[in-house]
Amino acid sequence: MKTQFAQNRAARWMAHVQQWRESGLGKTRYCRENGLALSTFRYWITKSRPSSGGESAAIPALVALPFTFASKAPSIGLMVSNRY
C-alpha cells in the first residue's frame, strides 16, 4: 500500500507526463521550462506506459488440456549412491 506522500508524488508526475504529451514539446525543453530533472521525468514516462506485468497483468486462469491414457507408461530409473 502506497503512502499518501507517494500517491501525491506519483499523481504530480503523471500530471506532468500528460501535460508534456499534450504540449508537443520535446522532453528536454518541457523539463527545462518546468524545472524538472530529465532523468526523473523519463522514469515517470516509462512508469506511465502500460506494463506487461504488475497490477495491470491478466489474471491467471486454468486451461483444460486434452488427456489420453497410454497403453504403457514410460519409466525412468534414478541411481543414487549405487541404489535405485
Image (cartoon, helix red, strand yellow):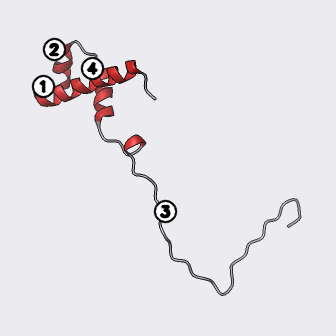
Q: Quadrant of residue 75?
A: bottom right
Circle 1 residue = 25
Looking at the image, is mark 2 or mark 3 earlier in the sequence?
2
Circle 4 residue = 38
Q: Are marks 1 and 2 in contact (CB under 8 Å)?
A: yes
Label 1 is placed on what type of residue?
A: Leu
Is label 3 or label 4 in front? 3
Q: Position of residue 69 (x, y in %)?
A: 61, 83
Q: At numbered mark 3, what does the secondary structure look like: helix, strand or loop? A: loop
Circle 2 residue = 33
Label 4 is placed on what type of residue?
A: Leu
Q: Position of residue 57 (x, y in %)?
A: 39, 47
Looking at the image, is mark 1 or mark 4 earlier in the sequence?
1
Label 2 is placed on what type of residue?
A: Glu
Q: Are marks 1 and 3 in contact (CB under 8 Å)?
A: no
Q: At numbered mark 2, what does the secondary structure look like: helix, strand or loop? A: helix
